[in-house]
């Protein structure tokens, strides 16, 4: 297994419509894992959330330390983990929603979602620690 890879060494893994897992901390310090759509952009992860209060957004506002993991499920296995501090912002919500909906569901769904969703927020994860791996060398 190759480790200590950079995102660009993962062969487009972060461009695939994979479900990422966002780990946030609840008030009692237990971890909540949430499946999310994401985009890798400008060296960080963007996750749109349709509800600007509660759940993962409330967790991030209280404790910004998060982890996001993206991994494929076919050979050769590849994965990416980013640990860092997240921010929550209403800016760029529709842009992030549109780009991710286009990637995951296509142009019609993206247009429908952008035109019908009430304003939400974007959780932005800036990297503190990046860990990436693949099994290319074991093929």
Image: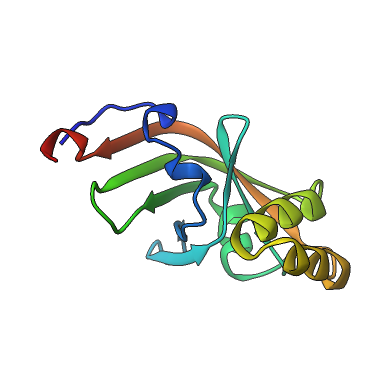
Q: Residue at x 40, y 35 (%)?
A: 11
In the image, 66: left or right of 78?
right
Is 5 situated above or below 117?
A: above
Where residue 86 sits: x, y (%)?
A: 58, 44
Picture quadrant where residue 45 is located: top right
State the image coordinates of residue 72 (x, y, percent, origin top left): 34, 54
The residue that appears at 69% across and 57% down in the rendered structure is 102
Of residues 113 and 54, the one drawn nearer to the viewer in this rendering: 113
**Is residue 67 rendered to the left or right of residue 111?**
left
Quadrant of the snapshot with the C terminus: top left
Q: Quadrant of residue 73?
A: bottom left
> In the picture provided, is 92 more to the left or to the right than 16?
right
Asked whether residue 27 is in view, the answer is no
Is residue 88 depicted above or below 116 in this figure?
A: above
Q: Position of residue 115 (x, y in %)?
A: 88, 67
| Horizontal arrangement in the rendering, residue 117 relative to residue 30 (left or right) | right
Q: Nearer the viewer, residue 60 or 94?
A: 94
**Residue 27 rendering spot, x and y as whole percentages:** 49, 65
Number of marks drawn? 0
Query: How does the figure colour the protein chain or chains?
Result: rainbow
Is residue 64 visible in this depiction of the protein? yes
The quadrant of the picture occupied by the N terminus is top left
Which residue occupies the foreground of this view, 130 or 103? 103
Please report the residue visible at 43 percent of the width from the left and 48 percent of the height from the top. 67
Q: Residue at x 24, y 46 (%)?
A: 76
31 in relation to 125, above or below: below
| View extreme (left): residue | 138
């Amino acid at each position: 297994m190759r480790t200590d890879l950079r995102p660009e060494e993962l062969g487009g893994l972060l461009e695939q419509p994979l479900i990422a897992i966002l780990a946030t901390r609840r008030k009692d310090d237990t971890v909540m894992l949430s499946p999310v759509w994401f985009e890798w952009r400008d060296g960080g992860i963007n996750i749109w959330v349709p509800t600007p209060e509660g759940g993962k957004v409330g967790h991030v506002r209280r404790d910004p330390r998060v982890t996001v993991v993206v991994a494929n499920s076919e050979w050769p296995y590849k994965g990416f983990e980013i640990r860092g501090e997240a921010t929550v912002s209403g800016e760029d919500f529709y842009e992030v929603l549109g780009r991710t909906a286009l990637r995951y569901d296509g142009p019609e769904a993206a247009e429908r979602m952008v035109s019908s969703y009430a304003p939400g927020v974007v959780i932005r994860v800036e990297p503190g620690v990046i860990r990436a791996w693949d099994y290319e060398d074991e093929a």
